[in-house]
Image (spheres, helix red, strand yellow):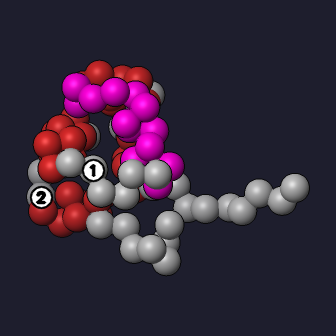
Amino acid sequence: MLWRMRKPHPIRKRRLALGLKGVELAREAGIAVSTLCDIEQGRNARPAVGTALAIAGALKVQTLAEFTALFVVSKRAA
């Protein structure tokens, strides 16, 4: 079976750039690891506002542009 290569989700890219494991980011954001996995793997394209803000805070997002880059993923890129 051939696996389709997809770009990593922007949240995953940022998390890895900060040297964080998924479990570490989830703990810092106060969310379940499964929730983070669902978001990073595209199964939850529209997380709750509180979840998005918690992840952004844990990833040290400081601007609206950074926030938008993490949470507004076009269907084409997914």
Residue 44 part of the magenta segment: no
Residue 19 visible (yes or no):
no
What numbered label is drawn on residue 63? 2
Q: Residue at x 15, y 50 (%)?
A: 49
Q: Which amino acid does label 1 sit on?
A: Pro
Above or below, 7 relative to 20: below
User: Along the line of sight, which residue is nearer the eye, 54 or 57?
Assistant: 54
Comes first in the chain, label 1 or label 2: 1
Residue 9 quadrant: bottom left
Quadrant showing the N terminus? bottom right
Residue that lies at the very extreme toward the right in this rendered image: 1
**Pointer 1 and pointer 2: residues touching (CB < 8 Å)?**
no
Residue 31 part of the magenta segment: yes
Name the spot of residue 71 as percent of width and height, x first.
29, 59
Q: Main secondary structure of the magenta part?
A: helix
Segment tinted magenta in the rendering:
29-42
The residue carrying mark 1 is 47
